[in-house]
Amino acid sequence: MARIRFSALEQMSGRTAVERGKKQRVSDIYGADVLTLEKMRHYLSVEAFKKLEKIMFQGGTIDRTLADQVAAAMKAWAVEKGATHYTHWFHPLNGATAEKHDSFIDVLKDGNIIESFDGKLLVQQEPDASSFPNGGIRNTFEARGYTAWDPGSPAFINNNTLCIPTVFVAYTGEALDYKTPMLKALALIDKAAVDICQYFDKDVRKVTATLGWEQEYFLIDEALYNARPDLKLCGRTLMGHSAAKDQQLEDHYFGAIPERVNAFMNELENECYRLGIPAKTRHNECAPNQFELAPIFEEANLAVDHNQLLMSTMKRVARHHRFRVLLHEKPFKGINGSGKHNNWSLLTDTGVNLLSPGKNPKSNMQFLIFLTATTRAVLEQEALFKACIVSLGNEHRLGGDEAPPVIMSVFLGRQLAAILDEIEQKVSSKKMSPDEKTELKLNVGRIPEIMRDNTDRNRTSPFAFTGNRFEFRAVGASANCGAAMIVLNAAVAQQLIAFKKETDALIDKGVKKDEAIFQVLRKYIIACKKIRFEGNGYSKEWQEEAQKRGLSVDNDCITALKAYLAPKAKKLFVENGVFTERELEARFEIKNETYLKKLQIESRVLGDLALNHIIPTAISYQNTLIENVKGLKEILPDVYAEVGNVQLESIKEISRHIKEIKTMVNEMTEARKVANNNFPNEVERAEAYSVTVRPYLEKIRYHIDKLELLVDDEIWPLPKYRELLFSR
Ligand code: ADP
Ligand code: MG
C-alpha cells in the first residue's frame, strides 16, 4: 500500500507549471462564450429584441412566437461558435449543477440532417429527472420535472454545448431547485426596497440585490489525492496527524503564489472571462495550499449562476494542471476550512447603493433604514440564517480556525454604533423641536465622513457590515449561494415591509414623514441590540453572553435544520410567496437526507480504511518489532527486556490502539445498523446518525492518528498532512 504513497510523491516531485492557452487581452475575450443581450440584437428583429429586453428587465412571460425567434437566434449564435449540443442548465437540490445534452440535429425526410432548435425546446423541457432529490414531492410514477428558461441569466457555451440557465420545478409546480425560490425572494425585496426608497426619491423603480462571493478552496496534487480514498470519496481527510508546521507562521497568507498554482489560476481566469465571470482577486489563503478567488459583484441571480459555473470550471481546469480542487468546508483537521463569504447589498436603478452612507442627511436616513432592517432581519430569522448555511461539512468548519462561530450576530463597527446610540437617545415619540431635528440630521449627515478610512474590521463576525455592504461569512465553500440568498433577501424584505407599515401608520396619524421615520428607526435600533456584537466572536465570553441573550449557540446541523419548519419560517416564506409549506418540508427533508447520506459514506470509508489499511499496516510494523525483540532475546537473553524496552512498549501501545480501532469500528457499524433498522424515516435516521454514528468518526481517528506517529514512515499507506499541504 505504501507503494502508492511513495509513487505519488515521486510523480509529484517531477511536476512543473503548465501554462495553457495563448495569452490574450482580457477585453478581447471577455464574455466571448456568453450570449449577451447586446449580441442578441444582431440575431433578432427590432421588435423581438425590444420585447425580450423588456422581459429581461421587468419580468413577464415569453409568448411562443418570441420564444421561436429567440431560440433561432440562440442556435445561430451557438452553431457559429462551433456548438453542437444544447442543454437546460439548472441547480437541483443536490448542490451541483445539472445538464443533459441534446444535439441540434434533426433528420429530414430525405435522410439529410439539419440543425434545429425551436421555441418549445427553449422555453420548457421535461427531463426525466427522477434521480434528483425531491423531498417526496415527486413520486416515481410521476417523475416528471420541468425546466424553464430564466431570461434573467444569459445563455452561454461550455464544452461545445449551448447552456440555457433554467429553473427546475416538479410536475405539480413545486420548486426542486435553488433558483425558483431565489427569484421570488429577489422580486420580494425589489418591491419592498422600492417602497422604502419612495420616501426619499420618487424616481426609484427597481432595486436589485447584489452579490459578490469570495470562493475559498484547496488545491491538492492529483497523485496524492488519488492515494487518499477519503479525499476521493468524502472530499475531506478522515484521518491524518497534524503536520509539525502548518499555518502557525502565517507565511502562506498573501504569499507569492506558487508557479503551478499560478498557471492553474491563469487558465481558470481565462475561462471565467470567456464566460463573463468578472474574476478580480486571487490570493493565497491562510492554510497551506488554500487559495481564494473573488469576482466583482453582480446582480445576485447572475452571481449565483456564476459561482455554480465557477465551481464546476475549477474542477475541470484543475485536472489540466494535475491538481484536484477541494471545495469541502473542512478538508483538514486543525487548520482553516474553506468558506464562501457572501458580500451583499442593494442597488437602485438610479445607481444608489442603499448600504452605502450617502452625501446628505436624507440619503443617510435611507441608509440607516436598510442597515437596521438588515440587522433586525438577522435577529428575527436567526434560526433560518443558521439553517441555510449548515451542512455536514460546515459543521466541522464553523466555530473553528478563522471561521465564524455558529452563533448568529451582526457587527456594525464603532462609528455606526455611536450614530445608532445617538438616535436612540435623541428621538422620542414626542414631537421634536426644530433645533433638535436639525442637530440630529446634521449628525446623521456626517456618517460618511466618520466612516471614511475608518471602517473597522472584525474577522470573527458571521455577519459583518464592511462599509458599503454586509458580508455573510458563514456560508460554506461548497454551498450553492442561493440557499443563503433566499433567506437573506426574504428576511430583509420582511423587515422593510414592516418598517413601511409602521411608518405609514404614524404618517396617517399626522406625524411628519421624517419624524415618523426617526421614530420607527429608533424602535428598530432598540430591537436589534440583542443581535449586535462588536467583540471577539471566537471567545468563550461571547458564548456565555450569547446564551444570556437567548441566541442559539449549538453547532449541530440536524437541530439547526428544524428552523425550516418553524412557524417563523412559514410566516416569512409562505405568507410572502417564496415557498409553499410543501416546498419547505421538502427542502427540510432533502437537507436531512443529504446529511445522512454523506455521514453514512464517511462512516463506511473510515471503517474500510481503518480495517484494511491502517490495522494491517500497524500489525506489520508490530511484527517487525516482535522480530526485533525476539532477536534481542536470542542474543541478549538476560537483558533483552531492558534493552528492548522501547520496542516492547511500542508493541503494547500498538495493540491497544488496534484494539480500540477494531472495537469502535464494530460499534460504529452496529450503530448504523440500529439506526437503519429503527428509523425507516430518513429525517429521523439522520438525527440518529448524527447522535450515534458521528461521534465515532473523531474517536476512531484519534487512535489512527496516534498510530501514524508510532508506525515506520516507510510503510505508512496514506499521504501525510505535511505531504498533502506542502506539495504544489
Ligand atoms: P475582503 O477580503 O476585504 O472582504 P475582497 O476584495 O476579497 O474583500 O472581497 C470583496 C467582495 O465584496 C468582492 O467580491 C466585491 O465584489 C464584493 N462587493 C463589493 N461591493 C459590493 C456590493 N455593493 N455588493 C455586493 N458585493 C460587493
Ligand atoms: Mg471578505
Image: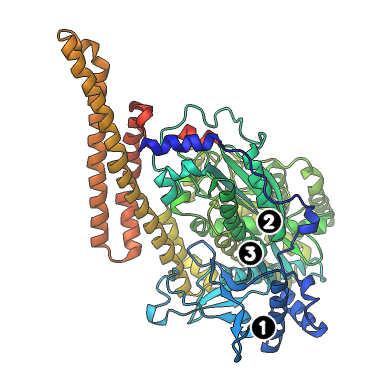
Amino acid at circle 1: Thr
Tell whether 132 sits left or right of 30: left
Q: SS at mark 3?
A: strand
Q: Residue drawn at (39%, 78%), measured in percent from left and top? A: 139
> Would you say the residues marked 2 and 3 are in contact, meaning their CB atoms lie under 8 Å apart?
no
Q: In terms of depth relative to the viewer, which is nearer, 419 or 600?
A: 600
Spatial CA span between label 2 and label 1 = 30 Å
Residue highlighted by disc 1: 61
- Are the two marked residues, 2 and 1, in contact with CB atoms closer than 8 angstroms? no
Which residue is identified by label 3? 158
Instruction: Residue type at mark 2: give it.
Output: Cys
- CB within 8 Å, label 1 to label 3: no
Give how far apart the Cα atoms at labels 1 and 3 are. Answer: 27 Å
Secondary structure beneath dot 2 equals: helix
Which residue occupies 34% across, 54% down?
A: 600
Q: Can residue 429 be seen at all in this image of the molecule?
A: no
Place of residue 341 in the rendered image (x, y in percent of width and height, measured from the top left): 61, 50
Q: Which of the two discs, 1 and 3, labels the residue nearer the N terminus?
A: 1
Q: Residues within 10 Å of mark 1 (few under 14, many from 20)?
A: few
Which residue corresponds to mark 2?
272
**Lower sequence index among marks 2 and 1:** 1
Mark 2 close to ligand 1, CB under 8 Å: no
